[in-house]
Image (spheres, rainbow, N blue to C red):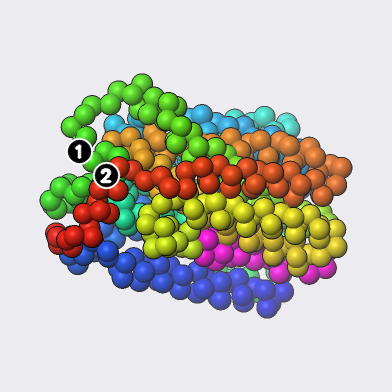
Amino acid sequence: MSTGNFSWNVLLAPVLVGSCIAAIITIYFRNNPLAHTRKFMMRRFVNWFPLGMTYAFLYMGRYNLNVAKGALGTLMSNEDFGWIFFWGTTTYAFSFLVNGPLVDRLGGKRGILIAAGGAALANCLLGVLTYLVLIGQLKMRLVVPLSVLYSLNMYFQSYGAMSIIKVKAYWFHVRERGVFGAVFGTLISIGVYFAFDWGQSIVVAAKAAPVAEPGLLRTLVQKIFATADGKVDAVWAVFFIPAAILVFWLVLDWWLLRDTPEEAGFPAFDTHDASSGKMHIHLSTMDLLRKVFTSPLMLMLAAVEFTSGVLRNGIMQWYLIYAKGVKLPGSEVFTEHWGLFLCIFGIIGGFGGGMMSDHLFHSRRGPPAALLCAFMFVMTIVMACFINTSALMVGSSAVLISMAVIGVHSLMSGTAAADFGGRKATATCSGIVDGFVYLGSGLQSVCVGHLTTEGWLSWPLFMMPFALLGGAIAVMFWHELPEATKRYNAEHKKSAPARR
């Protein structure tokens, strides 16, 4: 890594990401359509910020496998990686059938504690396995044990999204959720930055080869994780460090997080979602599952998320592998700062979709989702046209697809599923809808891993029809809103909301 690149990654990139976080906090406090009191806004911030940062670092403990793949070299082929990712994402998808109803009963606070603690444990086990293999104490192919441990990690990871949305459902009104959906997308984007750029920095710092001027990170990694003889790259650090960070945020969540405004000392808050007026009704596990699988609208949300999963991980999972394999001139700017690009443009996509939904389409989620899917379809065509000739066009298209897909994901799993599921069923509905993202991810993982053995043109061609299908389904619920939201919108024209 050159001195210039080192300066950018170590100094400028964190400053830029920190500025984005500061801007998001500013937007949060300025966006107050229901005229909440400052005390309520501040307590809600204290609630969602540590919860959100926990969720972001869960991503660091999820996509560190992608970073480790590059460092493991021949120990993990593209096809092996595809299968490991497939089993992990499939576990993630189906775990919602159990974990969704469970979080609806336990609450979001307990859910995020399970997510952080379980993912930290699983990452430690992944680190131990990597250590034993690299120092030669275990002689085996990594595909089976990594599939098992990564599936365990993804099982606990599945609690994260459900928990943050469960808490959001009680603290944010439907008219505020588009912007919170943007915050949700931002947290994902920042987590991707942590995973790829921080993860890559850890891998570089873990290299056994000496450097002329070791920085603080390298000094710490070598001191804590290097072998006694210092002859093996300490790749296992990329699993242990996220685990330690997750434990830190787990403690803060235990201390600060409250599931509802009432638990924090505020009056009851009607968010005018599908549970409005029905909070007294008890829902069994079968009732919760039936609410998803017998609802045409919820199934349409899940179908859009399935298509978004194909494109989301189709880009995040394979772009770096493509760039390193094809080695077209000009791709360096993307490979060296991939996490930062995904972070910045993911934030733009999340806020773009959320602001369009709340301010242009009166909190309808279908219209911006359809527009973003159409944009992704166009970008896959551009990728296909330039896949073997222009690194700049392929990289730019990949980043823009990632921008749009975060917008769609924020609107579907982060917002629409909670709107139509209601507070009582938020975790189950948003969890199962989110699970379809990872069914799509698992499908593309195996298919792209196999198809690209014949050439990379099949990569954008495979994603293209899914973008078109997602847009077509989103058009089908263009005008949909929960009945309570419709009533609120009608009443809001007559009187301003009371301050609490």
How crowded pointer 2 is (Cα within 10 Å; few <14, some 14-19, many 20+) is rated as some
- Which secondary structure type mostly characterizes the magenta part of the structure? helix
In the rendered structure, does residue 253 fall within the stretch colored magenta? no
Q: Is residue 496 above or below residue 141?
A: below
In the rendered structure, does residue 341 fall within the stretch colored magenta? yes
As helix, strand or loop, the secondary structure at mark 2 comes to helix
Q: Is residue 248 above or below residue 97?
A: below
Q: Nearer the viewer, residue 211 or 142?
A: 142
Mark 1 near mark 2, Cβ–Cβ under 8 Å? yes
Q: Quadrant of residue 142?
A: top right
Q: Nearer the viewer, mark 1 or mark 2?
A: 2
Q: Quadrant of residue 489?
A: bottom left
Report the number of numbered marks: 2
Give the percent coordinates (x, y) of residue 223: 56, 59
What amino acid is found at the position of numbered circle 1 in the picture?
Answer: Gly
How crowded pointer 1 is (Cα within 10 Å; few <14, some 14-19, many 20+) is rated as few
Q: Nearer the viewer, residue 291 or 41?
A: 291
Q: Which residue is labeled 2 in the image? A: 484
In the picture, the quarter occupied by the C terminus is bottom left
Q: Is residue 22 left or right of residue 87?
A: left
Q: Which residues are magenta?
A: 327-350
Q: Is residue 273 above or below residue 356?
A: above
Q: Residue at x 42, y 62 (%)?
A: 360
Q: What is the number of the mark on residue 12?
A: none
Q: Which residue is labeled 1 in the image? A: 277
Of callouts 1 and 2, which one flags the residue occurring earlier in the amino acid sequence? 1
